[in-house]
Image: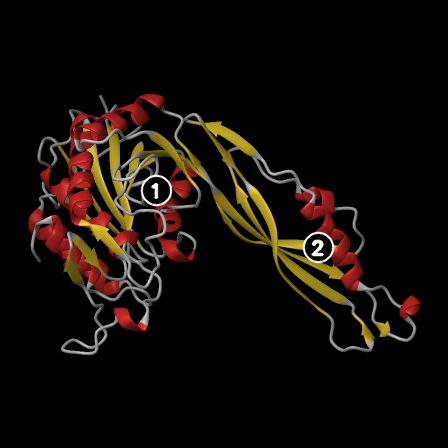
Amino acid sequence: MSSSVAELTRELVAIPSHDDETAAGDAIERWLREETTAHVTRDAVGNVLARKRADGSPRDEPAPRDESDDRRSLAFVGHHDVVSPADSQIRDAPEPGEYVVEERDGRIYGRGAADMKGAVAAAMVAFREATPAERADLVFASFVGEEVGGVGARHAIEEGFLPDYAVVGEGSTNYSSPGVTDVVVAHRGRRGVTVTAHGVASHASEPEAGENAIYRAAEAVERVRDLEFPSVEVAGETLAGSVAVTEIDGGSAINVVPDRCSFTVDERTVPGERADLEILADVPGLEWTVDQDLPPMQCDDDAFAEATLEAARESQSGKPELVTKPHATDAGWLSQAGTECVIVGPSEPGEAHTRDESVSIAVLERCRETYRTIAESWPA
């Protein structure tokens, strides 16, 4: 496997990883073992992890830490799973099943180019190039299962993965202005809830003999509709949450009063705040379950955020800013566990998960340089 960011991106993007991330993880692990002297591991779910330090610890000797050690760790974090490709993104020949990868007009096209194998490649090259700051460990992590709720990140955290700081390579380009790669210091989370109303069935000719579950659900829907959305102020921006009823299902026949009706609620959460679903507690016959709860993220270490912003400034001619992001990433799981996180990455709004997904080669190089610079200067 080659070593430049563009070539490494093309090679990673070509590897299918929507149903099974194993081959992509194999390629990342092999590259790290061949190109670096880091200690490289692969955990039980397929996450690829590597660690190195300024004193050149060999790959078969992980950097030790204990409670009395004042070393700090900085991690580059990404994921190598992708969403399912469009038919046009899958190669028929000569390698059936591989993803189609094209390069034109300074961009690399293919499933996962933006989200987020390009950023993974930039982080890998920066990890190879950087000499960590004194008394700092530099960590690389590429997780599985980000697209399905952070499976890999949660497993790694449960197994003790907890860097002090992390730069997560999700998209932060074109947020404050076109052509600029910003530093994200907060993002929203997502809570998905299923609300079920129970009633008593009866013949529709005698509705008073039953308890109509749809009516109970309708009362609950109206209360959700009237909820106030929480918001917080971060980096001079208002990061606002939202709540929406997105699905409803109930009834079995035109002549039967239903005994069951359910609906789903999509809530976009913000750091430290939640919509008050307890307003449903006194609706009779109602219960709800949380189907998904992806945590929000906020960086509380201003010095780390500013140091990363300075590294981003040095890597580009534009003027990057501290910004917020509207959707959840693995940074939320790390932040919830205690890691101070920022997000810096090449993907642009509206680029991921599309039929013509692509990433700018120039911005990949910009991110590589930003990652290398922060790795060599932080912790200060």
* Residue at the (11%, 55%) spot, across then down: 7
Instruction: Tell me if mark 2 has few (under 14), some (14-19) or many (20+) residues whose alpha carbon lies within 10 angstroms of its own.
Output: some
Task: State the residue in front, 372 or 338.
Answer: 372
> Residue 351, image x and y in percent?
32, 53
Colour setup of the view: secondary structure
N-term mark: 2 or 1: 1
Q: Which residue is mark 2?
A: 287
Task: Report x, y in % for residue 136.
Answer: 20, 29
Whether residue 339 is visible, yes or no, is no
Between the residue at mark 2 and the residue at mark 1, the CA separation in whole angstroms equals: 35 Å
Report the side of 120 relative to 187 (left or right): left
Q: Position of residue 240 (x, y in %)?
A: 52, 37
Residue 360 vertical position relative to residue 307 in the rendered view, above or below: below
Q: Which residue is mark 1?
A: 160
Q: Amino acid at mark 1?
A: Gly
Task: Give above or below for 86 relative to 363.
Answer: below
Q: Amino acid at mark 2?
A: Glu
User: Does 185 sit above or below residue 116?
Assistant: above
User: In this picture, is 249 found above or below 75?
Assistant: below
- Please report the residue visible at 22 percent of the width from the left and 21 percent of the height from the top: 380
Q: Nearer the viewer, mark 2 or mark 1?
A: 2
- Return the x and y of residue 66 as percentages of the image width and height: 28, 30
> Would you call the spot at circle 1 few (<14 residues within 10 Å), some (14-19), or many (20 or more)?
few
Quadrant where the image shows the N terminus: bottom left
Horizontal side of 164 relative to 285 (left or right) equals left
Question: Is 160 on the left or on the right of 60, as rendered?
Answer: right
* SS category of the residue bearing label 2: strand
Residue at image location 11% in from the left, 42% down from the top: 128
- Asked whether residue 139 appears in the rendered view, the answer is yes
Determine the secondary structure under disc 1. loop
Residue at horizontal 78%, vertical 70%?
A: 258
**In terms of depth relative to the viewer, which is nearer, 172 or 210?**
172
